Amino acid sequence: MTVTRPILYEHILFAVFWILGTCGFIGDELFDVFTKQRSLILLACDALIVLLGLACLRHRADVITIVSLTVLAITASVPLNGIPWKLALNGTRVFVGAMFVYPIFRYFWDDPKRHDHFIRRLDKNLYLFLWLQVFCLSYQYFVYGAGDHGGGSLGNWYSGTISMLIYLISFYLLRKRVDSKHFWSSLWINKQYFFLLLPTFLNETKVSFVLLLLYFILLMPIDKRLFVRAIVITPIAAILFFVGYTTYRLTYQGEFGGTSAGNADIFSEEYLLEYMLMDVENAEEDAEWNMENSDNGTADIPRVTKFLLLAVINEDNPGHIPLGFGVGHFKGGTQVEHTDFYNEYEWYLIGTIPYLLHIYLQLGLVGVLWFIVFLVSLFVRRPEHYPRRDWNLHLFLALLIVLNFFYIEALRDLEFCIVVYGLILAGWLPDAKRNLTADDEQEPAQELLPSTIS
């Protein structure tokens, strides 16, 4: 098959996805050189996505996104916070996914023939990625036990991110195979997608219980038979929830209240308070002790406590609420040095941090507002030739993004952005009369003129 420009773009995009999606596990378990050179690998992948995004740029809205976020990030960093240009430019890499991934997918959606070839390849790659997690998470569980090591093919400390990806990809692929007229039989035929969820209970990710609930609620077609389906599917969801909860209790190896957490109720008020909160007044001291004495050197401050501590940081550093402290605090330490803000608040910045704080600390309230408008726009910008919306998939994605804002910063990771932004567009469907029946060797449409900006 002739390698046309669209095919070349596909190769580059999927190469970046698989490099980012596997180099963590390969480096942790097989070849240590991947771990030592991981910063260079990430830099190379960022550069490829930037170049590919620019090559695929066709729409005025995407140009506005790239220019406005770049200007905002540089303004908040260099003149307002005195961050050196080198650190500021390196720091903007955490927003490469937000700026350049969506234009790449829009390029494939701009032409139906090009889209049909791409979507088949996307589905195959995502399906293979799901099965890879069964092996990786099982291996990590037997080697390390349940815990943050269970990041699947992403590697250590990516447990939350991989769990979200597993639920999202499984939901997307199953939704495409659910027949509203034969709902139960279509679920049974595609039962392997339920099996592919089970590895998420081998890494102690509490968010899996929330995702499992959303998964079954939104899986059902939204029509007049929704209520009846909800009644029938409730016991099925309850069984899987019980299996997941039992697996979680058997695998949990942390300590809670001086006893094994396996004997504690993880849904109890006492446990949730212990997990989500800590002493605010002693947070810095406790975090620094954890950094010096824990195996992974992370502060591990609970998420709610980090939100509470934000008031203390703002009080100690007045004038930063509108535009934050600039970019660069979440990059550096290998090829370039850390920022002064990072050196002062390392105990606060390392470890898990919700995406809302990730944005606010760098770009302030203006940045938070920018991201809200940007993300909402992705759900309302209907691509040409795709008049129908999969409301279930878009609702699942919207709730997943909200969860990120308050739970984890997965949206800064390029491989996560590739899946999320790609599936937002995949939620727009062609006219029901159009059928994706062409074989995989079908040639994509010819290239659009580079000057076509709609």
Image: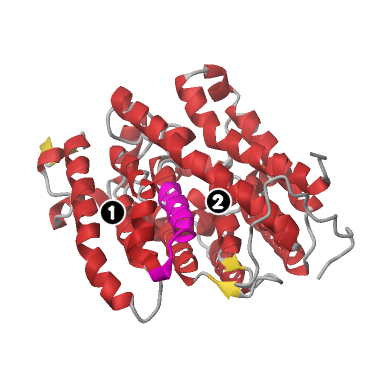
384 is within the stretch colored magenta: no
Q: Amino acid at mark 1?
A: Phe
Image position of 66 (left or right of 278): right
The residue drawn where x is 59% and y is 57% is 421
The residue drawn where x is 46% and y is 24% is 28
Closer to the camera, 317 or 73? Answer: 73
Image x and y of residue 124, in percent: 56, 44
Query: Please, what secondary structure does the residue beneath circle 1 have?
Result: helix
Judging by the rendered image, the residue that carries numbered circle 2 is: 419
Q: Amino acid at mark 2?
A: Val
In the rendered view, would you say 402 is above or below 192? below
Q: For the view shown, which residue lies furthest in the bottom direction?
A: 224
Image x and y of residue 254, in percent: 21, 36
* Figure quadrant of the C terminus: bottom right
Q: Which mark is residue 81?
A: none
Query: Please, what secondary structure does the residue beneath circle 2 have?
Result: helix
Q: Which mark is residue 209?
A: 1
Give the magenta range: 164-181
In the rendered view, would you say 27 is above or below 330? above
Image position of 190 (left or right of 364): left
Q: CA distance from mark 1 to mark 2?
A: 21 Å
Image x and y of residue 431, in percent: 63, 72
168 is within the stretch colored magenta: yes
First in sequence, mark 1 or 2: give its number: 1
Image x and y of residue 204, in percent: 28, 41
The residue drawn where x is 32% and y is 23% is 143
Closer to the camera, 58 or 387? Answer: 387
Image position of 451 (left or right of 214): right
Magenta stretch mostly in which secondary structure? helix
